[in-house]
Image (cartoon, rainbow, N blue to C red):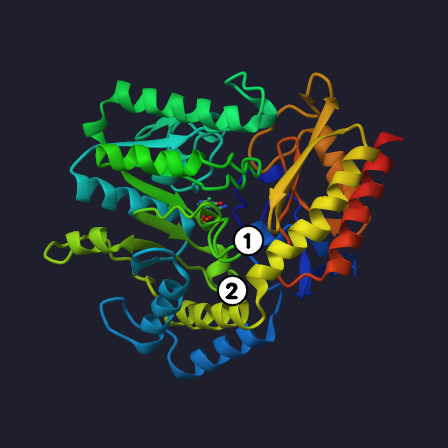
Amino acid sequence: MTGPVFYPWSAQEEIDPVRVAGGAGSWFWDEQGNRWLDLHAQMGNLHLGHQHPALVAALREQAGRMCTIAPSFAVDVRDEAARAIVEVAPGDLETVLFTTGGAEAVEHAVRMARVVTGRPKVLAAYRSYHGATAGALALTGDPRRWPVDTASGGAVHFTGPYPYRSEFHAENAAQEGERALEHLRRLVGYEGPDTIAAILVEPVVGSNGVLVPPDGYLAGVRRLCDEHGILLIADEVMTGFGRCGRWFAGDLWDVVPDLMTFAKGVNSGYVPVGGVLLSRAVAAHFAHRRYPGGLTYSGHPLACASIVAALRVLREENLVDRAAALGRDVVGPALAELAERHPVVGDVRGVGLAWAVELVRDRATREPLAPYAAPGTLAPEMAAVLAACKRQGVWPLAAGNRLHLFPPLTITAEELTAGIAGIDRALTEVSE
Ligand code: PMP
């Protein structure tokens, strides 16, 4: 189907998107009345679910007062949004640069790190995702995502920990973490520590597999940075604002970066927005220097009003602690049972409300169920699994050989249990 809208990812002729008619809470539906439990949360975005009344009301109210104002003017709602973010941010991350999404936030964080350190190189992890603009895609550690125009320019990539498919031949998670750190330490040495501006990490890898690092890994990366005056950039676009059961995934190990990127959950994605949190030292660097980084829509009033409202709901409804409890008490046990019943499940892993179910042909060899297909597309085996899920009324996010569960944080325990039961039936259906 070709039409006036250019859809990213697939060839335009192959596109036949589901035409969504509406959504409410954890559900969305099409024009034919098919309804799906949204375990996809629109790319891990809708922390407060579809059409949350507090967000809709805040947007209406702000639209009635002021729709837009350039970023060079001060406006109360922007200060309020920044204050609300700083209040939940760890350590001395006290200043916010607003962008219009995650990729721009990553590009700004990297630019700032280069400006602050005066060094050129940035190290980023294989199996990371940092966005689809030229710079962010080059930082993204996934060669299969690199079209010819960005072929890895601008970043040196390292291998992070992935116990299930250890490239370090580690026998357990702790050893994987140690060996991954040793690998990074060596790479820093080869590259020359005083040429490296920043190490960029997703504290928990999101889109590339929900990889929770072994304890000690992230703190080790922080120490390595400190030893060499390298800035640590944490990309919390996917993991921030409660997704991993803490306000930020780095909080799981009490690691505070120098720069932190965010987007998605900050306002549940109701208006495009993202940003960078700067440590006191990084912000101080710009006290007497210009930073050419203006974007027409930085700190857009509608975005800021939705941030203030979203963070208020996350706090008042205690949704961050709730995400931790739901992951621990509901999703973890239900997926462990699922894995016992279905040999096609090689691994289940996650924290808070970020989970992956990794599908394999053979548990012993861990051969993936499907070879990796181009981003946004699925190999036929995985397309069949996703189609079966959809027939069961559940829409997880399928990527590579994995089903990802990134539900709204407002989801109920009953919905989660029913959703995982739907995936269970879908796996039975495809195995028959
Ligand atoms: N960083 C991470 C960790 C992400 O998960 C994403 C989006 N999935 C991005 C950056 C890019 O964000 P955006 O799509 O808003 O540009």
Quadrant containing the N terminus is top right
**Alpha carbon of mark 1 to alpha carbon of mark 2: how far?**
16 Å
Estimate the x, y position of residue 244 in percent, counting from the top left: 55, 50
For label 2, the crowd category at 10 Å Cα-Cα, with few meaning under 14, some 14 to 19 and many 20 or more, is many
Q: Does any atom of ligand 1 lie closer than 8 Å to the CB of label 1? A: no
Residue at position x 52%, y 46% from top?
6
Whether residue 38 appears in this view of the structure is yes
Q: Is residue 314 left or right of residue 30?
A: left
Who comes first in sequence, dot 1 or dot 2? 1
The amino acid type of the residue labelled 2 equals: Tyr
Estimate the x, y position of residue 386 in percent, counting from the top left: 73, 40
The residue nearer to you, when weighing 95 against 20, is 95
Mark toward the viewer: 1 or 2:
1
The amino acid type of the residue labelled 1 equals: Arg
Say above or below: 392 vs 310.
Answer: above
The residue nearer to you, when weighing 19 against 225, is 225
Pick out the residue farthest to the left. 288
Find numbered disc 1 in the image and state the secondary structure of the residue it sits on.
loop
Residue picked out by circle 1: 243
Residue at position x 73%, y 56% from top?
37
Residue picked out by circle 2: 270
Say above or below: 94 vs 110.
Answer: below
The numbered dot on residue 131 is none
Find numbered disc 2 in the image and state the secondary structure of the residue it sits on.
loop
Q: Is residue 151 left or right of residue 282?
A: right
